[in-house]
Amino acid sequence: MYQYDEYDQRIVDERVAQFRDQTQRYLAGELGEDEFRPLRLQNGLYIQRYAPMLRIAVPYGNLRADQMRMLGHIARTYDRGYGHFTTRQNLQFNWPRLEDVPEILAKLATVQMHAIQTSGNCIRNVTSDPFAGVAADEDIDPRPWCEIVRQWSTFHPEFAYLPRKFKIAVNGAKEDRAVIQVHDIGLDLKRDAEGRIGFRVLVGGGLGRTPIIGEEISPFVPWQDILSYCEAILRVYNLNGRRDNAYKARIKILVKALGIDAFRSQVEAEFAHLKGGPATLTVDEVHRVADHFVDPSYETLPASDAGYTDQLAANKAFAAWARRNVRAHKQPGYASVVLSLKKTGIAPGDITADQFDSVAVLADAFGFGEVRVTHEQNLVLADVKQSDLFAVWEAARDAGLATPNIGLLTDIIACPGGDFCALANAKSIPIANAIQARFDDLDYLHDIGEIEINISGCMNACGHHHVGHIGVLGVDKNGQEWYQVSIGGDQGNDTALGKVIGPSFAADEMPDVISSLIETYTANRHDDERFIDTVRRVGADPFKTRVYADREARKQAHV
Amino acid sequence: MSEIIKHGVIHEDDWTVLRLGEGEDATSVELPAGRVIVPLAVWLARRDTLGAQAEAGVLGVWLAGTEDPATLADDLLRLQLIAVDFPKFADGRGYSIATLLRARHGYGGELRAIGEVLRDQFSYLTRCGFDSLQPATGRYTRPQLEAALASLKDFSDPYQGAVDRAEPLFRRVTRKVAA
Ligand code: HEM
Ligand code: SF4
């Protein structure tokens, strides 16, 4: 994984000093609320419902064991003992004191971390595939490119006050695990006919209140030009994006208003000036960065470990975990492990200080000291020997990180919602927990199979509800919390936006609604069909009919 | 007189920024005496009569965020001062306008940020090619401006190229892979 050199380190150190000064001026009353806001946001600091919230950057989801320990230390010292991983692979603390934030940032800087551009109307943390470098379906490792984009976008002086936030995601595998179609820029690594590397570039995707799937602006931008090309897109957006209405300020609205062809011609005109300029990447620079992402020193092992096979046969619980939480690896004898942060009753994505430490221990002992964050809000040990899996499972189980539910119904994505977020219409976490509690039978969960439930507390869509197979959106009805349900959304190569099934539901109806949807699925599915496949094949109608019929029946039963 | 920062030094400054009021017209508005920065519309309407003043360094032109700097491409050699207006400090169009004026059109005269120009943006403004920064009169005390000058050096080695240093870090220095 990337390690700072003296330049990277100096930049984060200088940032800490700058923010310390800004915070002092704010606390001294020299810097007004409005003037301080974008400065603190560009350091990840929100003022929330009950307390400030600090969002720490986890560049493209990569973490090291020492960083995990530091996060645990911060959770213990400055927060209430836990943190929260987000759908953008970042980490949030919900209870820091504003006065402490410069100190927290200083501590983060000692382990090469920061909160730079994790919020605000600037280029945000670059996101990518949590299985980068180890996935069997990967063509090109996205991590060096993510790091190159990260450095280019960090403190880019021209693009710090954009009309709205700007998110870039990079994918290098056959199956897109970085949701590039719903990012402001989606970069899809490709090879041309001669085998040269470049990017298919998507633009104008996004969720939020106007969900839009990104469109292709270029089928192939050679790697040398990618920063210049991004600069051209950003400049056209910075100059022409709407600034009169925050809800219409994202690049997706500009792309829609102009049409992709007109937008493309503006970008191409700008790019014509920039192409071949100083931002052109060099082989040396790409190699320098890529050298940080070489394979760890794998042992030469048989494709399948005999001991592991025996353990699977001997221990049902271990086998159930392995079936969901262990993924194939490109290297014979190795596997990737997903540590579940979706234990029933815990807010999805939450992690305690002790768990930070446990994960650090696991990473050091069994995973080359590295950890990844997934946008589904779980953690990954990317490189584990099959012969170590049993030990990893035991330790993860003791730490409460081995819920065998990855990809299953209880692996719910949820935003912090009304329990924390000032913008919320409704709570998300209790809904997630109520659904998890309803579906607590492991055999039934496995029988239901792969399904994604995504919950957002308002239309800002932090919980990605539009792309959930089942999406749940908190809405406000006369000051009360209600939930709108959609089905048919999907992420990845088949990205689709879900469709609302009908009138919204009260919080206590939600587990029943999910049950009705699931029963409709199990009644209609063909062999090996996932929930989303059945929805696609039979359409939404049978689901709707059943959900509202069941609701009516429940009402009758209560009269 | 207002205090501005120019080439990294605090200066007393006597330029007046002319803004068209309600009902005022670019062709007829009366220009104040002394050194004046006029809106682009005034310059475009009266370029022939104002040209000599511009060349003499007593008249400059300011651009709004909506205005295309290419409009001034043919005038850049005559103009000694161009200003870019920031109606709100969070309105970042001016950063691109400045970049285009400098990097695309080769403008070499004074480039001034006017409007809501705040010290916490000084460093980004400078990097995008502004060599003079004019906060609202009275916005900062002298000691505050002096402190702000120091903050221009907050970052010693930025990653990406910009107007001030066109080359990105990877072209300016040799970065080694840590062993
Ligand atoms: C608790 C404080 C939070 C606040 C105040 C907040 C605020 C917002 C706002 C205002 C938007 C909509 C912006 C727009 O559409 O232009 C948004 C979108 C988003 N946020 Fe958050 N958010 C918070 C937490 C989170 C968390 C915890 C996650 C991850 C679980 C997250 C991930 C996202 C994502 C993925 C989007 C959608 C991006 C898109 O539109 O493409 N946010 N957030
Ligand atoms: S979706 Fe809404 S409620 Fe949830 S975190 Fe985002 S802004 Fe807050």
Image: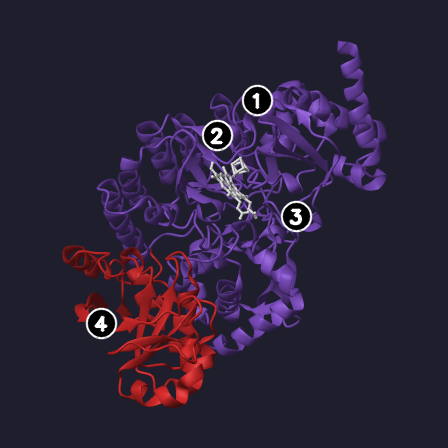
Chain colours: A purple, B red
Residue sitting at 38 percent across and 71 percent down? Answer: B98
Mark 3–mark 1 CB contact (< 8 Å): no
First of labels 3, 2 by sequence position: 2
Q: Marks 3 and 1, Cα distance to the nearest angstrom?
A: 26 Å
Relative vertical location of residue A294 with respect to residue B24 in this rendering, above or below: above
The disc label shown at residue A350, or none: 2
Give the crowd class for mark 4: few <14, some 14-19, many >=20 residues within 10 Å.
Answer: few
Q: Marks 3 and 2, Cα distance to the nearest angstrom?
A: 24 Å
Does residue A235 show up? yes
Look at label 4 and name its amino acid: His
In the image shown, does A164 or A431 lie closer to the viewer? Answer: A164
Q: Marks 1 and 2, Cα distance to the nearest angstrom?
A: 11 Å
| Residue A257 lies in quadrant | bottom right
Q: Is mark 1 within 8 Å of ligand 1?
A: no
Q: Which residue is mark 3?
A: A492
Residue sitting at 63 percent across and 53 percent down? Answer: A181
Q: Marks 4 and 2, Cα distance to the nearest angstrom?
A: 49 Å
Mark 1–mark 2 CB contact (< 8 Å): no
Does residue A140 show up? no
Q: Secondary structure at mark 1?
A: loop
Host chain of mark 3 = A
Look at label 1 and name its amino acid: Thr
Q: Which residue is mark 4?
A: B7
